[in-house]
Amino acid sequence: MAYENPEGVMIGLEIHIQLNKLKSKMFCGCSTAYHDAEPNTHTCPVCLGLPGALPVLNKEVVRAAIKVGLALKGEIAEETQFHRKNYFYPDLPRGFQITQYDYPIVSNGKVVIEGEDGEHEVKIWRAHMEDDPGRLVHIGSIAKSKGVMINYNRSGIPLIETVTAPDMRSPKEARRFLDKFRNILEYLGVFDGNLEGAMRMDANVSIRGGTRVEIKNISSHKGVEKALLYEIMRQKNVLRRGGEITQETRHFDEARGVTLSMRTKEEAEDYRYFREPDLVSIHVSHLIPEIKATLPELPDAKRARFLEEYGITDMHAKALTSSILLADFYEGVCKKGAEPKTAATWIADVLLGELNYRNLVLASYDGVSLGCINDKEPELGNSFKADDMVELITLFTEGKISDKAAVEVLRTKLDSEEEKTPLQLVKEKGLFKAEAELVVKAVSEAIAENEIAVQDYLGGAEKSLNFLVGQVMKKTKGTADAKTARELLVKELKS
Ligand code: ZN
Ligand code: MN
């Protein structure tokens, strides 16, 4: 069935991503690791925009941009150059952003997403390099703030701005595009989407071929979907009442779930773009073959290989390649000897479910070992490693523990900073199948063989229960958990 879009919804996105995995800033040697740093400690005359300071282009930024362009199946410009985008704002002390204008490094790319009616291509018009401004920190809430502080640690962080064609036809498609886009960039190893401010989005939307409205600066994929849902509804209502959609820029109020008018849209002329005279044109064609050769396996290719190599279902392959960390984790577990299909179920269904439920995300220690971190505050002490997964799966597939017991162990590991291995936890909690059955058997034997003690207990002599517990312990050679034995005895005797 063809996808219906009676309202003629057309959505385009502009996405800024920080190349936060690169070591230094775009035009100076300052470190990009600013997230936990004291304010204004990762700065120098260049990224503070002091008069006379000259930018020197970090070649890693160019290499990363080429990688992104190739991964987006785009064309890489033979010659590319920088422009100044002039505007005044306190977070931009030089008075202009160094960006690219009519010669972006990447153009005409595409990303295939799972659309409303099957696979669907989203065209990428362009992707270009530019530097991030500093960051304004309001004292208290923005509305009532008594003052604003400025932190220039972010100033000069390399960004890639990507502009798509209005090829998405629903808020859900926009979100799917963003998930896929983020995934591709993380595979390239130039970007970590978990860091605050790593990905910022503007969405534009029009309906029935009308005027398009832009919603600025949304920080999450979910936020983009919500803002678009609201905005489409708002535009429909305006048209229904016989009104007109005005071309404007709107702001998304995440807490209230509404978009609010900010200003009418500024035109490119307002920025007085001109060539950045402090930087020469760059020619990159000689770099392309080498970068192409070292491009990592990307999500679609990995998914196809997982299907082929591990014989898992398409749903599992999709889930397991939805993040490079998860994919590496899965392969790590398989290489360490877990059966691939079972591992896929335990990782894609069980582990992912438990992580989502706890709002945990994956983090990598060393490429194979997985850590679970809170979205906001990484707690890397709280870990669940590939080795743990292998041990757990093995205990389960060898029939030593039930699936329920395996889930219990997994939850214990995720909920605490438990350093014990799954095997140690199984022992400690008495979760071995055989063990549990042994205790049950010992309990019924103890009851059958000690009629007097049973009668005494039922007659009110609590002490007799201790005797029966002792019998169970004796029969299990002390391996039973005394508390469990007591509970089972009471249950049996009272039934
Ligand atoms: Zn600097
Ligand atoms: Mn930009």
Image (tube, rainbow, N blue to C red):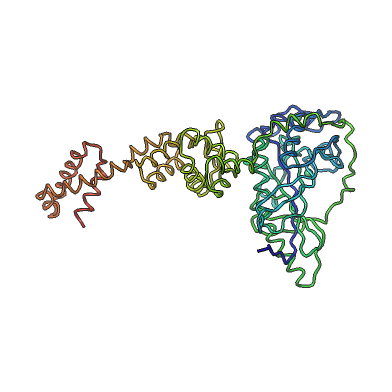
Farthest-out residue, left = 452
User: Quadrant of residue 139 in the image?
Assistant: top right
Q: Quadrant of the N terminus?
A: bottom right
Q: Quadrant of the C terminus?
A: bottom left
Residue 15 visible, this orientation: yes
Q: Position of residue 4 (x, y in %)?
A: 69, 64
Name the residue rendered at 71%, 34% in the picture.
Answer: 153
Left or right position of 261 against 466: right
Percent coordinates x, y for residue 277 in the rendering:
90, 32
Could you say where residue 136 lies in the image, as x and y percent from the top left?
A: 72, 42
Q: Image height check: is 399 above or below 223?
A: above
Say if 18 sits above or below 294 in the image: below
Please indicate whether residue 436 sits to the left or right of residue 127 in the image: left
The answer to whether any part of residue 41 appears in the image is: no
Relative depth, front residue between 303 and 157: 303
Q: Name the image quarter holding residue 19.
A: top right
Q: Residue at x 89, y 37 (%)?
A: 275
Location of residue 379 in the rendering, given as x and y in whole percent from the top left corner: 53, 37
Taking the image as shown, residue 84 lies to the left or right of residue 170, namely right
Q: How many marks?
A: 0
Say which residue appears at 43% left-offset and 34% top-offset: 419
Q: Quadrant of residue 377?
A: top right
- Residue nearest the viewer, comparing 20 with 91: 20
Ligand 2 visible in quadrant: top right
Q: Nearer the viewer, residue 35 or 108?
A: 108
